[in-house]
Image: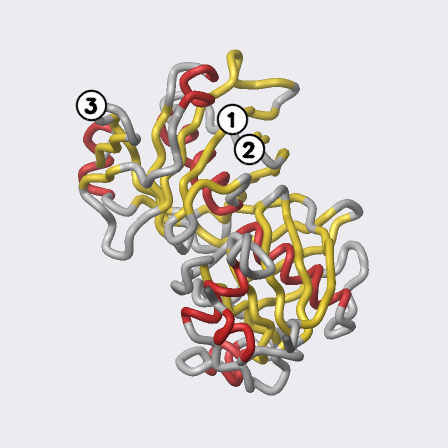
Amino acid sequence: MYGTELQQLAGQAFAKAQATGNDFVMLSDPKGELALTDSQVQALCHRRFGIGGDGLIRAIPTALVAGYEHQAVENPQAYWFMDYRNSDGTIAEMCGNGVRAFVHFLIAEDLVDLEVGQSLQIGSRAGVKQVTRLAQGYAVNLGEWGLIFPQEAEQDSVDSMVRPAGWEQGLPALSITMGNPHTVVALPDAKMLQELNLLAAPEVSPVPEHGTNVEFVVPAEPLLHDGVAQVAMRVHERGVGETLSCGTGACAAAAAVRYWARGSALINVWSVEIPGGFVGVEFQANNNGGEDTILSGPAQLVARGVIGTD
């Protein structure tokens, strides 16, 4: 099915990485020589005919990425750029799990030296991100979150309607940007969350300009446990389908629940349960009068190989 596309990449070394079950094909391209097509990305990410992954990440010097060379000039420490593609070949602005896996890959490839407690700047289509190595995993500052439709959202805390596959009626939702678009729906209980059919993309109205990821979230009861707010989430990712985890989606889910509860004291530390495990989300005031969103969690390389020549 994808024989020609894979033959064109024969001999190319790769790694496979995962971060709370969000999995990626990882390629190193230090000279910027890989001009990947959509079909090649689809072939590599196919779970039957290829390596398999929710997406593909190419490590390329930031100065070699057309349209983003300025990031290397303005942030010389951001030497490496995370070129992220969804499994269908489309380009995505950011992937919170992917950037943790990306830094883990850079370390494993001896492309960077990063000790526990040290930070690294990474170029991306959502801007330069700072990633800190933890004793167990990585924390990435994804920058400020915001509302995609702020005027409507200020009125009633919802701005969209989402209709899951098989449902006759839609559910109210809130559209959040984490550098990429998300639409968050709150559900009343875990049973409803478990029974959702996310094989097909939920219908969203209105749809943000560049499409959207859709998160369904259930807050814990009680919400707080030892000062940490807890929520459970499932997600249908734009260009992928349902995944075991979505880092920016976890941040968007926490931001939405926090926004809905803004009448009470703001909660800054969150634990988000996804099918692939748990990630941490923390909101921190920045020097611009806004709030940065810090995502933390594990990352792992699970395989290495070379694309076959047969």
8 vs 134: above or below = below
The residue located at (74%, 71%) in the rendering is 112
Question: Which of pointers 1 and 3 lies earlier in the amino acid sequence?
Answer: 3
User: Residue 125 location in percent, x, y?
Assistant: 44, 67
Asked which secondary structure carries label 2, the reply is strand
The crowding category of the residue bearing disc 2, from other C-alpha atoms within 10 Å (few below 14, some 14 to 19, many at least 20), is many
CA separation in Å, label 1 and label 3: 24 Å
218 vs 105: above or below = above
293 vs 301: above or below = above
Foreground mark, 1 or 3, reads 3
According to the image, label 2 marks what residue?
A: 274
Residue 232's disc is 1
The crowding category of the residue bearing disc 3, from other C-alpha atoms within 10 Å (few below 14, some 14 to 19, many at least 20), is few
Looking at the image, the residue that sits furthest to the top is 222
According to the image, label 3 marks what residue?
A: 168
Query: Is residue 148 among what the camera can see?
Result: yes
Badge 2 vs badge 1, beta-carbon distance below 8 Å: yes
Asked which secondary structure carries label 3, the reply is loop
CA separation in Å, label 2 and label 3: 26 Å
The crowding category of the residue bearing disc 1, from other C-alpha atoms within 10 Å (few below 14, some 14 to 19, many at least 20), is many
User: Residue 104 location in percent, x, y?
Assistant: 71, 59
The residue located at (52%, 59%) in the rendering is 45
Foreground mark, 2 or 3, reads 3
- Tell me the quadrant of the picture where the C terminus can be found: bottom right
CA separation in Å, label 2 and label 1: 6 Å
Badge 1 vs badge 3, beta-carbon distance below 8 Å: no
The residue located at (22%, 36%) in the rendering is 160
Residue type, mark 2 in image: Ile
